[in-house]
Image: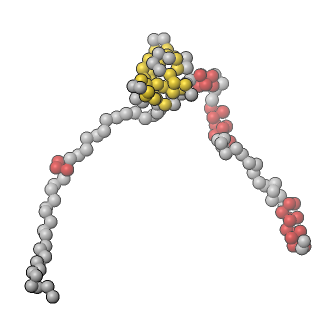
């Protein structure tokens, strides 16, 4: 090897070129900032309650009967969904009964169904435009062609 190549290699190794590289992290894990924020905000008493709360994943309709999907299991009306019993299954939510309390669990949290606003009709919102003036092109007669 030449002296330049040896010197460059020596500078790279001794200069800390490899030592400055960040350690590899698992791409499927959230960033460290997000993990520390979640760990700091979660109280130890809230962790068991959050783990026990079932999550509604999907609502299926099979042979006209609705099912709620909890993990890998299908739950129908009257079945237990976590610690509560399914009272009703709708298009976008299920209703769970826990004693005398009835709770609605939406399929998509934060999204509510609303009626669409009436579109404005063209006659009521705008004035009619005048018809365009069509320019008449002269008609050619068979005798006029060259």
x, y (%) of residue 70? Answer: 54, 26
Q: Quadrant of residue 3?
A: bottom right
Q: Compared to 118, does 143 lie above or below?
A: below
Residue at 13% over, 76% down? 137
Q: Residue at x 81, y 56 (%)?
A: 18
Q: Is residue 145 left or right of residue 17?
A: left
Q: Residue furthest top?
A: 99
Name the residue at 67% across, 45% down: 27
- Relative placement, left or right, of 97 versus 131 is right
Residue 19 seen in the current view:
yes
Residue 97's x, y, as percent?
47, 16
Direction from residue 54 to residue 102 in the image, left or right = left
The answer to whether 72 is drawn above or below residue 145 in the figure is: above
Is residue 46 something that shows in the picture? no
Where the N terminus falls, by quadrant? bottom right
Would you place residue 79 above or below residue 92 in this image?
above
Say which of 41 and 70 sits in front.
70
């Amino acid at each position: 090897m030449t002296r330049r190549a040896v010197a460059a290699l020596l500078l790279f190794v001794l200069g800390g070129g490899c030592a400055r590289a960040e350690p590899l992290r698992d791409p499927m894990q959230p960033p460290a900032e997000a993990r520390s924020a979640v760990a700091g905000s979660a109280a130890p008493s809230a962790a068991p309650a959050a783990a026990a709360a079932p999550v509604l994943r999907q609502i299926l309709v099979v042979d006209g009967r609705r099912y709620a999907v909890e993990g890998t299991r299908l739950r129908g009306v009257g079945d237990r969904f976590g610690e509560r019993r399914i009272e009703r299954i709708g298009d976008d939510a299920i209703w769970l009964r826990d004693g005398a309390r009835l709770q609605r669990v939406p399929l998509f949290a934060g999204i509510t169904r609303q009626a669409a606003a009436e579109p404005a009709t063209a006659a009521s919102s705008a004035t009619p435009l005048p018809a365009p003036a069509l320019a008449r092109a002269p008609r050619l007669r068979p005798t006029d062609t060259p």
